[in-house]
Amino acid sequence: MITVFDGATIAARERLDAWRDITSTFLIPTAVDSPKPEAFTAQLRVMPFGDAQLASMAYTSLSSRRSPRDIRRSDPEYYQLALVRAGCQIIEQNDNSSVLAGGDLVLYDSSRPLRTMFDATSPAETVQLHFPKRMLPLPAHQVADLCATSLLPGAEVVGRPLAAFLASLAACRTHCTDRDALRLETIMVDLTTAVLAHHLERKNPPLRSATHTLYLRIIAFIEENLHRPQLRPTMVAAAHRISLRYLHRIFQQHHLVSVATHIRTRRLERAGRDLADRRLDHLTIATIARRWGFSRPAEFSRAFQRHTGIPPRDYRNNT
């Protein structure tokens, strides 16, 4: 993981303001305060995993609030799953309120008002998984009921592996390849889905039908093969030994767009990430297009401009 903030390197009187700035950049923007600003210190390390991000944090007493105004100003439409490593913390969202201790898992939503509090002499430690809400294949209105509730009690069988997995990734000091990052992203979101589905199934019919499981396998297959130009609905159907008609029916049941549109959108999102990565400036736009399955640069440019509103070259120069 990369350390992006270390309070030990910043003057005490500047730490809280600096923490506000860095968390607004790398996490979800919130209004942060501390009952003991003169003694405040913190550390933040991050690691990207495709569209998801893992953040490891340690901080002394603070409170944070995400208001409706903050949401209107900036909403990345993310879920955040937090593993509390140390410290007793309070979180409130969607009329739910929980007191969380070490080992607890909790989910919250960037699109809804949020309040958290921590006040103690010893620093709190958390590991947070941030990922786009569209990646969670569960009904949003049902997931909302689970926000700001402790997810581990009653779900140890599926919750403990998720907690251990997040903690092990947060402890990593080395970087993984882009392909490995995509695979790990899928694992983290799948484990999160399993924990949330376990809780939802107490009040609702089972969410993991055979069709839904197949859908998740298809999504994972698409993510792992975005770089292949031949990735099309026919290839996806053949790989899962189903008819093209049945593939389209599965997507109609579980997805907002068609298979082809999903493939194209994910490719464009990956290409956009690479264009914004300064470490890849040595690669031409055509090379990046080919990395994500676009064999014709002109076709990629037109599709990218329709998707983002600006040409790939301007996107690279302005991000």
Image (tube, rainbow, N blue to C red):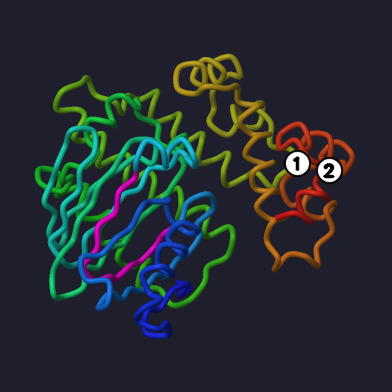
Q: Is residue 240 above or below residue 253?
A: below
Which mark, residue 283? none
- Residue drawn where x is 67% and y is 41% of the image: 267
Whether the residues at callouts 2 and 1 have beta carbons within 8 Å, the answer is: yes
Q: Position of residue 212 (x, y in %)?
A: 39, 26
The answer to which image quadrant residue 154 occupies is: top left
Label 1 sits on what residue type? Pro
Q: Residue at x 62, y 44 (%)?
A: 225
Q: Which residues are magenta?
A: 54-66
Q: Give residue 57's position: percent from left, percent from top.
A: 33, 67
Label 1: which secondary element:
loop
| Residue at horizontal 44 percent and vertical 34 percent from the top | 216
Specify the quadrant of the image occupied by residue 247.
top right
Residue where numbered disc 1 is placed: 229
**Which residue is label 2 attached to?**
295
Crowd tier of the residue under label 1, counting other residues whose Cα lies within 10 Å: few below 14, some 14–19, many 20 or above: few
Q: Amino acid at mark 2?
A: Ser
